[in-house]
Amino acid sequence: MTQPLLQAKSIAKTFSQGRLDVPVLFDIDLALQPGEFVAIMGPSGCGKSTLMHILGLMLSPTAGQLWIDGRDVSNIKANGRARLRRKKIGFVFQRFNLLPTVTARQNICVAERIRGHEIDGQIDRILDDVEMTHKAHHKPGQLSIGEQQRIAVARAVVHRPAILMADEPTGNLDSHNAQHVLDLFRQINRDYGITVLMITHSPSAAQAADRILHMTDGRINPDIP
């Protein structure tokens, strides 16, 4: 087996609330192979999003180790995490987080400038791939919910990250648009070779993945197939 693209070992997370410590994650072990599509499924409040934030270098673990591309990133400083995150990871969230005052295309351009990338035909190609070329010059308020999510996906993968992390990406969508986004993830995984990690509470959404991990009470449950 090849070296995991992402590997977590004994990850734990505790938040402090005044004098009270609140443990959220316990002894998480996880490995993603290059090109996998993995879903982490579990009920609200089980720690799924916190785990994704740690795996996506937005939070540091309280304990444990995390490797990305063979590099131990457990204790790198915030600016180092930010650089690696911009280079290696794309994010899609339940709330699309699009800038409301600029067009769909400009939303992607702004993200690329933040990453320090050249603005070129790659943006036009990704708009075509997500079937949004005809809406490129519309502002988010002029797009449907499903169209906004497709722009959010395009923004996340235009720089061809190694990993796409999606947190409840179908949570705000009806069944038709949810299926469209899941099909888009499959296409991105297949055609671009991007590893996909999706957080979801939806069994039907999780079925789009090649492998499903089940979380309960801050732990990945190996006893649920």
Image: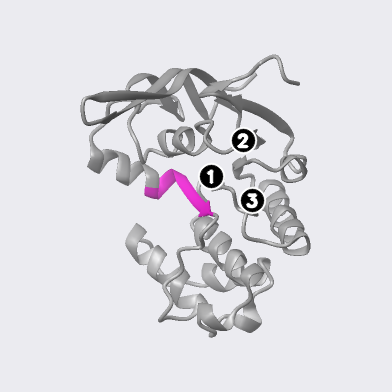
Amino acid identity at mark 3: Tyr
Tell me: residue 8, above or below residue 58: above
Q: Mostly what secondary structure, the magenta segment?
A: strand
* Front one among 28 and 194: 28
Nearer to us: label 3 or label 2: 2
Percent across and percent down for residue 8 are: 47, 22
Q: Is residue 116 visible?
A: no
User: Element type at marker 2?
Assistant: loop
Judged from this view, the residue extending furthest toward the front is 19
Magenta-drawn stretch contains 78: no
* Front one among 89 and 182: 182
Tell me: residue 96, above or below residue 186: below
Nearer to us: label 2 or label 1: 2
In the rendered image, the quadrant that contains the C terminus is: top right
For disc 3, the marked residue is: 192
Percent across and percent down for residue 41 are: 65, 34
**Residue 111 lies in what quarter of the image?**
bottom left
* Front one among 83 and 53: 53
**Residue 34 lies in what quarter of the image?**
top right
For disc 1, the marked residue is: 165
Tell me what residue is drawn at x 73 percent, y 63 percent.
177
In the rendered image, the quadrant that contains the N terminus is: top right
Q: Read off the magenta span.
A: 86-93
For disc 2, the marked residue is: 43
Tell me which numbered mark, 2 or 1, is placed earlier along the sequence: 2
Q: Which mark is residue 173?
A: none
Percent across and percent down for residue 44 are: 57, 38
Amino acid identity at mark 2: Pro
